[in-house]
Image: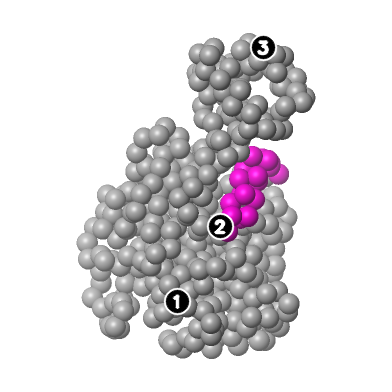
Amino acid sequence: MKQLEKLLKKTAVSRPSKTTSRQIVVFKTQQDYRQCLDILNANGIKPVKAVDSHRLICCHFHRSTDMEKIKQHPRIAYVQRDAKVKAHAIKPAAAAKRGGANKATKKSALVDTAKIPWNVSRVKSPELWNQTMGRGVKVAIIDTGIAKHPDLCIAGGVNTITGGSFQDDNGHGTHVAGIAAATGRQKIFGNAPKVKLFAVKVLDQNGNGFVSDIVEGIDWCLKRGIKVMNMSFGLTGSGNNKALQDAIKRAAKQGAVISASAGNEGTMFSPLIDAPARYPETIAVAATDRANRVADFSSRGNGISVAAPGVDILSTLPGGTYGKMSGTSMAAPHVTGGAALLRALFPRMRPAEIKRRFEASALQIPGGRQAVGAGLLQVAPAAVIPAAVASGSRFPSKTRRLKKAKSASRPVLLIPSGRSKR
């Protein structure tokens, strides 16, 4: 440890500069991790962050540092650059006037149907609302934060960048949150209107962030029992990051359902979608338009699970306003809201089964597997597919899947026996 101590004292600094780089150091044991923190503190070096559950320390190092020497130390698991990620929205928000909803054309006992956007109807989330609207399920939007809004009910949050406010200073996170969980109190409904919504601010005012902030955000969620997470951002191209992948694996192992946007690179990097969407533990989501065609900007590649609307989607924005945005960022929260509805009905359902249900019940649309995965997300049918399909023992044919998606338009759904609603 003495060699490592000397290296750290010589090369790590508390403040970033043009001559430093931001690195993640992960230790093999908790003891070594703690000892390293003590060494840094004793020498007046304050890490950017430390995440106990991952034995992870993020520090600024002089660019002249020979990181290989640190990597090769027997007590170090790995060292890698703290990579940057970016939000998956491609168009700026277009704010609409604040105000009430359009006059309803039809009423139901549960909701004013005029407040249900076309995209939410398209994925058949409202057809489960006579059973559940997601009440009691904790959902995290890991993004730029969430702003106060009359159509959003925020239960809490965290800012892993500065430790300050989790209020949205970009607009992206608020828009994503509305698609997942807008309450309909003012103008629009999201897919799961009664969930407990949490803002996890890991991206800055420009929609950019670091992996270490995301890892800390995931850890914050798990400690609070938040097991449905939305990640509308990604590492582009062929880049990978072990710290991010390890955090995703840990979350999935603890029962977290993670919806991740596929990316907005179109066919540029085919056949590779962005991380974390390309990790098998997530539900990777492509974007479609109002005609159920894959969006031109939606990334293609292996690993896409399903597609959901992502073109000109109306949702909530800071300042109590509404506006349209496009991107796979807008597609992913449809899956997040849908997963919350299934979790409300089946609290013990594992993430892998939820993913299989979404894939097995998806409506087949043009584009192919590398563009739209199994097809267009259909939330209500996913709740009632046969147990054999949900377990992965068999996969329905094209004809049967289309038939199931069409038959799911009935408003009353029979929940499988032995399952209690939450």
Q: What's the amino acid at mark 3?
A: Lys
Question: Which region shows up in magenta?
Answer: 238-255
Query: In which quadrant of the rendered view does residue 360 lie?
Result: bottom right
Q: Secondary structure at mark 2?
A: loop
- Secondary structure of residue under mark 1: loop
Residue indicated by mark 1: 421
Residue 239's place in the image compared with 46, above or below, is: below
Residue 273 location (% of width, % of height) = 66, 53
Q: Amino acid at mark 1?
A: Lys
Q: In terms of secondary structure, what is the magenta stretch mainly?
A: helix
Where does label 3 land, which residue? 6
Q: Residues within 10 Å of mark 1 (few under 14, many from 20)?
A: few
Residue 421 visible at all? yes
Judged from this view, the residue extending furthest toward the front is 31
Sequence-wise, the earlier of marks 3 and 1 is: 3
Q: Is residue 119 left or right of residue 250?
A: left
Residue 280 lies, in percent from the top left, at 68, 57
The image shows residue 337, relative to residue 67, as above or below, that is below
Residue that numbered label 2 is attached to? 256
